[in-house]
């Protein structure tokens, strides 16, 4: 099956997956998970050789992890208002990602310039009211990296816990 055929769904072909690289790669200094884009070192190295289907798998994992981390600190009140603000503020975001990923893109673009989160369609969860939006953005970025590291260590760096040394499944 070709990449194009693999990527076709009921809605037609998907757009090409953009690289998640943000130009702050730490895999070159020995990190197994990049502190910038949160991809695994082998994904950074092999990205250009990946099919669109493989890139989509990585993109979906990263978006799910990021959305989880953001949703632990914020609640989106008005998705349409958030989307409108992203458009007005010219904040680049992936419309196919979860709105919590959009919120993180907004915070990266200008957390210090947001005085009234509700005017942007979101609120800070009560347990995080003592933190500034900039502090929350930085915490989320760190938690996103920790979640990616934990995933790498559990599923890639650790031998399969459900198979014996020869690779046979335990019964």
Image (cartoon, rainbow, N blue to C red):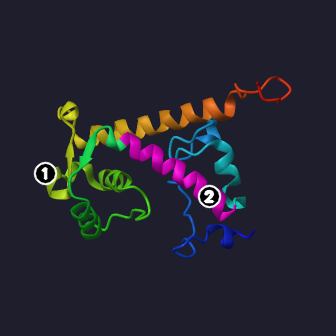
Instruction: Using the image, determine if residue 103 lies above or below residue 9.
Output: above
Residue 16 point in image, percent of width and height:
57, 69
Q: Is residue 62 magenta?
A: yes
Q: Can you name the residue that lies furthest to the front here?
A: 171
Q: Could you say which is closer to the camera, residue 105 or residue 1?
A: 1
Q: Callout 2: 10 Å neighbours few (<14), some, many (20+)?
A: some
Q: Is residue 162 left or right of residue 59?
A: right
Q: Quadrant of residue 81?
A: bottom left
Magenta part of the protein: which range? Answer: 51-69
* Residue appearing at x 69%, y 68% in the figure: 3
Q: Is residue 130 left or right of residue 134?
A: left
As helix, strand or loop, the secondary structure at mark 2 comes to helix
Could you tell me what secondary structure mostly forms the magenta stretch? helix
- Numbered label attached to residue 66: none
Viewport quadrant of the N terminus: bottom right
Q: Can you name the residue that lies furthest to the bottom here?
A: 12
Tell me the residue that label 2 is attached to: 55
Q: Is residue 163 left or right of residue 107?
A: right
* Residue appearing at x 27%, y 54% in the figure: 110
Q: Could you say which is closer to the camera, residue 91 or residue 162?
A: 162
How far is the residue under mark 1 from the one under mark 2?
A: 36 Å
Q: Is residue 142 left or right of residue 171?
A: left
Q: Is residue 78 magenta?
A: no
Q: Which mark is first along the chain, 2 or 1?
A: 2
Judge depth for marks 1 and 2 and give the one in front: 2
Residue 156 point in image, percent of width and height:
67, 35
* Residue appearing at x 55%, y 31% in the figure: 150
Q: Could you say which is closer to the camera, residue 166 or residue 133?
A: 166
Viewport quadrant of the C terminus: top right
As helix, strand or loop, the secondary structure at mark 1 comes to loop
- Numbered label attached to residue 116: 1
Residue 117 point in image, percent of width and height:
17, 51
């Amino acid at each position: 099956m070709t990449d194009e055929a693999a990527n076709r769904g009921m809605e037609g072909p998907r757009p090409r997956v953009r690289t998640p690289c943000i130009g702050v790669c730490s895999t070159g200094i020995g990190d197994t998970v990049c502190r910038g884009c949160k991809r695994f070192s082998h994904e950074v190295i092999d990205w250009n050789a990946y099919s669109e289907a493989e890139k989509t798998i990585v993109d979906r994992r990263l978006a799910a992890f990021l959305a989880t981390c953001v949703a632990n600190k914020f609640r989106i009140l008005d998705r349409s208002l958030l989307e409108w603000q992203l458009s007005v503020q010219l904040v680049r975001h992936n419309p196919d990602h979860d709105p919590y990923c959009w919120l993180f893109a907004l915070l990266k673009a200008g957390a210090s310039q947001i005085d009234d989160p509700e005017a942007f369609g979101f609120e800070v969860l009560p347990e995080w009211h003592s933190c500034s939006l900039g502090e929350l953005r930085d915490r989320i970025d760190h938690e996103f990296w920790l979640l990616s590291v934990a995933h790498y260590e559990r599923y890639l760096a650790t031998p399969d816990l459900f198979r014996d040394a020869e690779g046979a499944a335990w019964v």
